[in-house]
């Protein structure tokens, strides 16, 4: 019973009473602890990265290190990444000040909430597509994070600009693409590349020490 629960929670599979989580073979108790540790560490990393932020005039979405942190979470955890991102968003909406501009249910009305939805979409899709965890696979997953975050983020920002600022739909969409996507692309591509390389080295070391 414990083994089945551990496999379900950790996203692994049962093999002779042990839980296989990617390149690791763990006892059920350790698999549960790993899942909790991954989630706690990922939420902490996303929270800390949100604090390193700054804004530019005319750009309602802050520049942060969250794309770097998110990409690390996704490339390190792969198909399990969505759990961490979902826990992070839930904590913020329940009132924990984990987002770049605070927290609480009112954050849904902020111009940047769409990017948080993009975080979850990217964790779900890019997490699976970052496997196998080769250098190429991790880079593919890392670069896929960007459009998956940008799409809901820009659409949400455009809706916010139209509703709150009173811009026409076409003007709001153009403004959202400029201030919510284009200004971030060079910075985000650099972060994605760094995250993919760091994840490759970390996973290679982790799996080697478990052999």
Image (cartoon, rainbow, N blue to C red):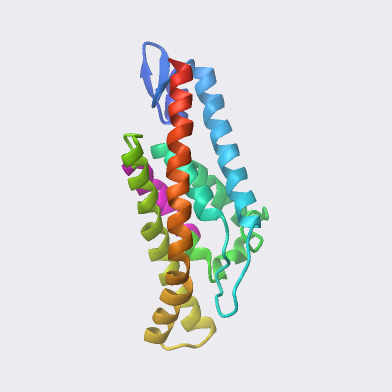
Task: Indicate the quadrant where residue 139 lies.
Answer: top left
- x, y percent for residue 124: 38, 47
Q: Is residue 153 above or below residue 209?
A: below
Residue drawn at 44 percent across, 51 percent down: 192
Side of 200 relative to 44 (left or right)? left
Q: Relative to 161, does residue 210 appear above or below in the rendering?
A: above
Residue appearing at x 33%, y 47% in the figure: 140
For the residue pair 77 and 120, the one nearer the viewer reads as 77
Question: How many marks do you count on the picture?
Answer: 0
Magenta: main secondary structure equals helix
Q: Is residue 126 visible?
A: yes
Q: Is residue 176 above or below residue 113?
A: below
Q: What quarter of the picture does the N terminus occupy?
A: top left
Q: Which residue is at the front of the view, 190 or 166?
A: 190
100 within the magenta span: no
Stretch in magenta? 116-129
Q: Is residue 46 left or right of residue 208?
A: right
Residue 174: percent from the left, percent from the top? 40, 81
In this rendering, is residue 199 above or below 110? Answer: above
Q: Closest to the observer: 148 or 209? A: 209
- Image coordinates for residue 145, horizontal then vertical, percent: 40, 53
Residue in the foreground of this view, choosing between 168 and 143: 143
Q: Residue at x 62, y 50 (%)?
A: 47
Q: How far across and down, in percent of the image, does residue 78 sit? A: 40, 38
Quarter occupied by the C terminus: top left
- Residue lying farthest to the top in this orientation: 16
Residue 122 on the magenta segment: yes
- In this orientation, does residue 5 appear? no
Quarter of image, res 8? top left
């Amino acid at each position: 019973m414990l083994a089945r629960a551990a496999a379900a929670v950790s996203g692994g599979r049962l093999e002779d009473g042990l839980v296989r989580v990617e390149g690791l073979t763990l006892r059920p108790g350790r698999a549960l602890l790993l899942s909790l540790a991954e989630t706690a560490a990922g939420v902490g990393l996303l929270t800390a990265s949100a604090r390193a932020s700054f804004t530019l005039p005319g750009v309602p979405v802050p520049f942060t290190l969250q794309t770097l942190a998110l990409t690390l979470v996704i490339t390190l955890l792969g198909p399990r990444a969505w759990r961490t991102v979902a826990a992070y968003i839930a904590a913020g909406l329940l009132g924990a000040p984990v987002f770049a501009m605070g927290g609480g249910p009112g954050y849904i009305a902020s111009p940047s909430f769409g990017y948080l939805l993009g975080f979850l979409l990217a964790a779900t899709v890019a997490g699976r597509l970052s496997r196998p965890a080769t250098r190429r696979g991790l880079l593919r997953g890392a670069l896929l994070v960007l459009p998956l975050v940008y799409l809901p983020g820009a659409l949400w920002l455009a809706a916010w600009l139209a509703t709150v600022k009173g811009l026409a739909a076409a003007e709001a969409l153009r403004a959202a693409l400029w201030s919510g996507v284009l200004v971030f692309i060079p910075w985000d591509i650099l972060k994605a590349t760094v995250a993919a390389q760091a994840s490759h080295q970390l996973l290679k070391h982790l799996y080697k020490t478990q052999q």
